[in-house]
Image (tube, rainbow, N blue to C red):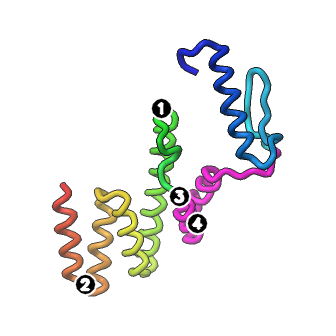
Amino acid sequence: MGDRPDEKARRSLSTAVWQICHCLPDKEYILSNLNTIQFDPRAPLSFDVDEFEALVSRTDVSGLHAAIALYRGEFLTGSYEDWIIHERYRLENLYLDALARLMATYEAQSEFKLALETSLQLLSYDALREDAHQTAMRIYCRLGKRNAALEQYQHCSGLS
Protein backbone atom coordinates (compact mmCIF):
# COMPACT_ATOMS: atom_id res chain seq x y z
CA MET A 1 0.00 0.00 0.00
CA GLY A 2 2.71 2.46 -0.91
CA ASP A 3 4.21 4.71 1.74
CA ARG A 4 1.52 4.17 4.36
CA PRO A 5 2.40 2.63 7.70
CA ASP A 6 1.21 -0.95 8.04
CA GLU A 7 -1.59 -0.14 10.47
CA LYS A 8 -3.09 2.53 8.22
CA ALA A 9 -2.72 0.26 5.18
CA ARG A 10 -4.53 -2.58 6.97
CA ARG A 11 -7.38 -0.24 7.92
CA SER A 12 -7.67 0.91 4.30
CA LEU A 13 -7.71 -2.69 3.12
CA SER A 14 -10.27 -3.63 5.75
CA THR A 15 -12.52 -0.76 4.62
CA ALA A 16 -12.18 -1.82 0.98
CA VAL A 17 -13.03 -5.45 1.84
CA TRP A 18 -16.05 -4.28 3.86
CA GLN A 19 -17.28 -2.22 0.88
CA ILE A 20 -16.79 -5.14 -1.51
CA CYS A 21 -18.63 -7.53 0.83
CA HIS A 22 -21.62 -5.19 0.93
CA CYS A 23 -21.83 -5.29 -2.87
CA LEU A 24 -21.96 -9.09 -2.93
CA PRO A 25 -25.02 -11.22 -2.26
CA ASP A 26 -23.09 -13.26 0.31
CA LYS A 27 -20.15 -12.00 2.35
CA GLU A 28 -18.80 -15.55 2.45
CA TYR A 29 -17.61 -15.07 -1.13
CA ILE A 30 -14.50 -13.37 0.26
CA LEU A 31 -11.80 -15.42 1.97
CA SER A 32 -9.31 -13.47 4.04
CA ASN A 33 -6.84 -13.73 6.87
CA LEU A 34 -4.12 -11.44 8.19
CA ASN A 35 -1.96 -11.97 5.10
CA THR A 36 -4.23 -12.72 2.13
CA ILE A 37 -7.57 -11.89 0.59
CA GLN A 38 -9.29 -13.54 -2.37
CA PHE A 39 -12.63 -14.43 -3.85
CA ASP A 40 -13.63 -17.95 -2.88
CA PRO A 41 -12.93 -19.99 -6.02
CA ARG A 42 -15.91 -22.24 -5.14
CA ALA A 43 -18.32 -19.30 -4.98
CA PRO A 44 -20.92 -19.10 -7.74
CA LEU A 45 -19.46 -15.87 -9.13
CA SER A 46 -18.50 -14.96 -12.64
CA PHE A 47 -16.32 -12.10 -13.72
CA ASP A 48 -16.94 -10.25 -16.94
CA VAL A 49 -13.21 -10.01 -17.70
CA ASP A 50 -12.86 -13.81 -17.52
CA GLU A 51 -15.91 -14.26 -19.75
CA PHE A 52 -14.65 -11.62 -22.19
CA GLU A 53 -11.22 -13.30 -22.44
CA ALA A 54 -12.85 -16.68 -23.10
CA LEU A 55 -15.16 -15.28 -25.77
CA VAL A 56 -12.50 -13.21 -27.52
CA SER A 57 -10.30 -16.29 -27.88
CA ARG A 58 -12.98 -18.01 -29.93
CA THR A 59 -12.84 -17.91 -33.72
CA ASP A 60 -16.53 -18.28 -34.51
CA VAL A 61 -18.71 -15.28 -35.35
CA SER A 62 -21.08 -15.81 -32.43
CA GLY A 63 -18.18 -15.90 -29.93
CA LEU A 64 -16.68 -12.72 -31.35
CA HIS A 65 -20.10 -11.02 -31.33
CA ALA A 66 -20.63 -11.99 -27.71
CA ALA A 67 -17.18 -10.69 -26.74
CA ILE A 68 -17.77 -7.38 -28.51
CA ALA A 69 -21.18 -6.99 -26.87
CA LEU A 70 -19.72 -7.73 -23.45
CA TYR A 71 -16.98 -5.09 -23.72
CA ARG A 72 -18.15 -1.97 -21.89
CA GLY A 73 -15.19 0.33 -22.37
CA GLU A 74 -12.29 1.21 -20.15
CA PHE A 75 -11.35 -1.16 -17.37
CA LEU A 76 -11.78 0.53 -13.98
CA THR A 77 -12.43 3.98 -15.42
CA GLY A 78 -11.02 6.73 -13.24
CA SER A 79 -8.26 4.57 -11.74
CA TYR A 80 -4.70 5.18 -12.86
CA GLU A 81 -2.46 2.75 -11.05
CA ASP A 82 0.16 1.17 -13.31
CA TRP A 83 -1.33 -2.31 -13.18
CA ILE A 84 -4.80 -0.95 -14.00
CA ILE A 85 -3.54 1.05 -16.98
CA HIS A 86 -1.69 -2.01 -18.28
CA GLU A 87 -4.81 -4.17 -17.92
CA ARG A 88 -6.97 -1.46 -19.50
CA TYR A 89 -4.81 -1.37 -22.64
CA ARG A 90 -4.54 -5.15 -22.79
CA LEU A 91 -8.33 -5.57 -22.70
CA GLU A 92 -8.84 -2.73 -25.17
CA ASN A 93 -6.43 -4.41 -27.59
CA LEU A 94 -8.32 -7.70 -27.25
CA TYR A 95 -11.54 -5.84 -28.08
CA LEU A 96 -10.01 -4.12 -31.12
CA ASP A 97 -8.54 -7.42 -32.29
CA ALA A 98 -11.94 -9.11 -31.98
CA LEU A 99 -13.52 -6.36 -34.09
CA ALA A 100 -10.76 -6.68 -36.71
CA ARG A 101 -11.13 -10.48 -36.86
CA LEU A 102 -14.91 -10.19 -37.15
CA MET A 103 -14.54 -7.59 -39.91
CA ALA A 104 -12.14 -9.85 -41.84
CA THR A 105 -14.39 -12.88 -41.35
CA TYR A 106 -17.42 -11.05 -42.69
CA GLU A 107 -15.48 -9.81 -45.70
CA ALA A 108 -14.14 -13.33 -46.42
CA GLN A 109 -17.72 -14.67 -46.22
CA SER A 110 -18.93 -11.95 -48.63
CA GLU A 111 -21.12 -10.50 -45.87
CA PHE A 112 -20.29 -7.03 -47.11
CA LYS A 113 -22.84 -4.98 -45.19
CA LEU A 114 -21.80 -6.64 -41.92
CA ALA A 115 -18.12 -6.18 -42.78
CA LEU A 116 -18.75 -2.49 -43.45
CA GLU A 117 -20.70 -2.05 -40.19
CA THR A 118 -17.89 -3.73 -38.26
CA SER A 119 -15.18 -1.67 -39.95
CA LEU A 120 -17.07 1.53 -39.10
CA GLN A 121 -17.51 0.34 -35.51
CA LEU A 122 -13.78 -0.29 -35.31
CA LEU A 123 -13.07 3.16 -36.77
CA SER A 124 -15.42 4.80 -34.29
CA TYR A 125 -13.25 3.38 -31.53
CA ASP A 126 -9.89 3.86 -33.23
CA ALA A 127 -9.95 6.29 -36.18
CA LEU A 128 -6.33 5.48 -37.08
CA ARG A 129 -6.92 1.80 -37.95
CA GLU A 130 -5.68 1.58 -41.53
CA ASP A 131 -7.01 -1.96 -41.94
CA ALA A 132 -10.53 -0.77 -41.13
CA HIS A 133 -10.25 2.17 -43.56
CA GLN A 134 -9.04 -0.18 -46.30
CA THR A 135 -11.85 -2.63 -45.64
CA ALA A 136 -14.45 0.13 -45.65
CA MET A 137 -13.14 1.43 -48.99
CA ARG A 138 -13.14 -2.07 -50.53
CA ILE A 139 -16.65 -2.77 -49.29
CA TYR A 140 -18.02 0.54 -50.48
CA CYS A 141 -16.65 -0.31 -53.93
CA ARG A 142 -18.17 -3.80 -53.83
CA LEU A 143 -21.52 -2.28 -52.86
CA GLY A 144 -21.28 0.14 -55.80
CA LYS A 145 -20.78 3.18 -53.58
CA ARG A 146 -17.74 4.65 -55.30
CA ASN A 147 -18.28 8.14 -53.85
CA ALA A 148 -18.45 6.73 -50.32
CA ALA A 149 -15.17 4.88 -50.96
CA LEU A 150 -13.54 8.11 -52.12
CA GLU A 151 -14.89 9.97 -49.07
CA GLN A 152 -13.48 7.22 -46.85
CA TYR A 153 -10.10 7.60 -48.56
CA GLN A 154 -10.16 11.38 -48.11
CA HIS A 155 -11.12 10.98 -44.46
CA CYS A 156 -8.30 8.48 -43.94
CA SER A 157 -5.80 10.69 -45.78
CA GLY A 158 -6.75 13.68 -43.67
CA LEU A 159 -5.93 11.83 -40.44
CA SER A 160 -2.23 11.42 -41.19
Q: Earlier in the sequence, mark 1 or mark 3?
A: 3
Residue 91 place in picture, x, y as percent: 50, 49
Say few, some or many: other residues with alpha carbon within 10 Å of mark 2 (under 14 / 14 to 19 / 20 or more). Answer: few
How many angstroms separate mark 3 from mark 4 (CA)? 9 Å
Is most of the magenta stretch helix, strand or loop?
Answer: helix
Residue 77 place in picture, x, y as percent: 49, 45
Q: Secondary structure at mark 2?
A: loop
Residue 16 placement, left or right of 24: left
Q: Residue at x 68, y 22 (%)?
A: 11
Residue behind mark 4: 66
Q: Amino acid at mark 3?
A: Tyr
How many angstroms separate mark 4 from mark 1 (CA)? 29 Å
Residue behind mark 2: 145
How many angstroms separate mark 3 from mark 2 (CA)? 31 Å
Q: Quadrant of the C terminus?
A: bottom left
Res 126 quadrant in image: bottom left
